[in-house]
Amino acid sequence: MVDESTEINAAASDDTLSEMRDLYSIIRQANEAYYQNDEPVLVDAEYDKKKERLRQLERRYPNLKAVDSPTGKVGAPPAEGFKKARHEVPMLSLDNAFSVEEVLEFDAKVRRFLGWDIGTPLEYDAEPKIDGLSLSLTYVDGLLRRATTRGDGTTGEDVTRNAQTIPEIPERIEGAPSFMEVRGEIYMGREEFKSLNERQEAASGKTYMNPRNAAAGSLRQIDPEITRNRKLQFFAHGFGKISEPLGATHAQAMTRLSEMGLPTNPITKTCSNFNEMKEYFEGIEQQRSRLAYDIDGVVFKVSRISLQTRLGSSSTAPRWAVSAKFPGETAWTTLRRIEIQVGRTGALSPVARLDPVTVGGVVVSNATLHNEDYIAGVGSDGQPIRDGKDLREGDWVKVYRAGDVIPKVADVDCSRRKGGSTRFEFPKACPACGSAAPREETDAVRRCGGDIACPAQQVERLKHFVSRNAFNVEGLGDRLIEQFHSEGLLRQPADIFKLRKRIGSGENSLQEWHGWGAKSASKLFDEIDSRRSISLNRLIFALGIRHVGEGVADRLALHFGTWSAFDETLTSACERNENALSELVSVEGIGETIAKSLIGAFSDPNIKKAMDGLVNELKDIQDVERAQISDSPISGITIVFTGTLAAMTRAEAKARAEALGARISGSVSARTGLVVAGQGSGSKGKKAQELGVRVIDEAEWLDLVGKAG
């Protein structure tokens, strides 16, 4: 894994794009394996490091956010087999820290958000992070009404019948608020895990990799009696929607839950300063092996509930909590050869093929090598680069633990290098189509110049198009995409919707292919036809435009609302229309790099023709429904903050506005509905007046959101 520091060499910023793409592939596969199949392919420490690395890059280079970034998502969609249940309040994951120094930085970020200096007292409640399965328990008038897994954070699986078999989860509690959603962790103790695997092995049944895996599989049994016999346990660690407060601090709330009969972890502590947080983390790490259950870190939460409310949450994690993780495992093996793969944006990505090595029962055989500078250990200027390795075929390398996905080389032992080894010669042409693969002056990644004519890019774009968070065409997997492409049936996304006409009947129909029948072929074509209706954000994401990941697609869709408005603005921007260009960059988070990438795609006649052909195959592009929050006077309004605010930080003001349903923009345009001007508002306030946009001062803003609160 790369160095955990958040500092990244600015000169190598474009280098990160290739790495981000690899990280997405790894994390997506790991999410599905972990959340849906209960068969993790990455240890938690390695998964956390990869996801945190992606967050670090995105924070440092917000305008270079990777395509397919999973950092705006939580978990994975619910698995089939259980009724879906929507959470009253999203069940978010936690941001991670991988050292006590990063915990200190978390504290600094909290203080910056609140506008507090280091001398202001701030307490944190600390608790071990159980390595289990998140569960939400909903009590109405003291009765357990529903138990739900986290799922994707918005919708989970209703496992109420199974949860009722766990003795530690009370079906009735006294003294509870009329509505209370308790959140906690289902886990399996180490002794029960060992016993379960012994019983399973004796019965020739499925054995489990670890207690978390076993707990998740046990809770999701169709037969509740199987769950009952698995001796699962539960710790409450928080709450969601609640009709009345449980206490002024998190610790008080947990004490109240304990008094109601819900189990809470006894080895928790309120820390008054960073030294106490550090001591607690180190103490729990020392106890780790002696505990009766698995843990993978420590959770620190801002103690006062009122401050948690002020801090709020991002799209994926609360700002008031962090998970400090324990380090993971590594192993040494031989790098046999280096191969070059071509991604859908044309990037040439080197991959290490390794002698398979087992780390904790998981086999590692591949590793990402990112780009030619990473392999060479020096940049184009001949200077050593951060994390560069000087890797050569035959080297003895250290890798982080992974399963069927691609980990990263952490180190190389040059002392074991055999004589005669030579540096790897990175290709200057695309290995798939032979087109020149130039490298821009500021880019560490070589890119195939063949664009959508390159067969490798075609295949990867098609795979992206049908992926879960794009058009989600079930049954049209990677191998089938490759097969259809090799047969000349698929070149562009629109071709997918023409498959029924091309191979739906006749001598060369799909049902005549080996392994296919009339029923399976019809099922695939019906699935494809069912995807002719798509939401605008998914469509934009599915186009696979460089730098346009899910988060960017969501923001574009929310801003423009309809495909016609989006298409019209981009077409005008390609013609250098100043109003269109201003409109595009006014979208929050859309900087010069993303705007340039969008305009480049819409300017390319071949890409534009492919997009128009796709849209013609669709029946319905669903307009975005603007979020509406009851009684909020700013719901659906685009707001621009400018100048310095006195009562709260700019970050807190934006978070408050978003929580009330507003959209935040970085610049003033005709779509702006309100400008909040603090001291020294400058040109934005002046432009708002010119456009006739309402401008209010901080006092009016506080009065406005006070009414909404």
Image (cartoon, grey):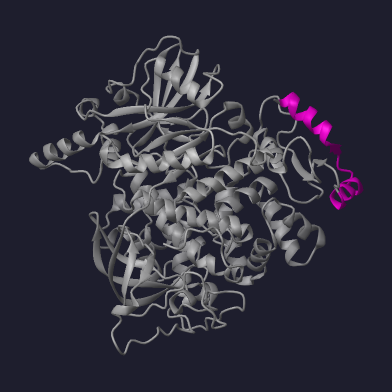
Residue 529 in the image: x percent, y percent?
46, 50
Image quarter of the N terminus: bottom left
> What main secondary structure does the magenta stretch of the protein show?
helix
Q: Between residues 120 and 111, which one lies in front from this camera angle?
A: 120
Q: Quick check: is 683 in the magenta stretch?
A: yes
Q: Is residue 642 left or right of residue 337?
A: right
Percent position (x, y) of residue 547? 58, 61
Residue 624 figure quarter: top right
**Pick the front one: 343 or 247:** 247
Residue farthest to the bottom? 420
Residue at (21% x, 25% y) in the render = 225
Q: Which quarter of the figure is the C terminus placed in? A: top right
| Residue 619 shows in the view | no
Can you say whether 565 is above or below 338 in the image? above
Name the quadrant containing residue 511: bottom left
> Looking at the picture, how far across and down is residue 209, in whole percent?
23, 46
Task: Specify whether residue 346 is painted magenta.
Answer: no
In-image side of 330 versus 467 (left or right): left
- Picture residue at 45% right of the left edge, 70% below the top: 370
Residue 659 makes an appearance in the image: yes
Closer to us: 223 or 387 = 387
Residues rendered magenta in the picture: 682-708
**Percent x, y of residue 536:** 60, 48
Whether residue 647 sits left or right of residue 604 in the image: it is: right
Looking at the picture, does residue 424 appear above or below residue 499?
Answer: below
How many marks are shown on the rendered structure? Answer: 0
Q: Is residue 464 left or right of residue 115?
A: left
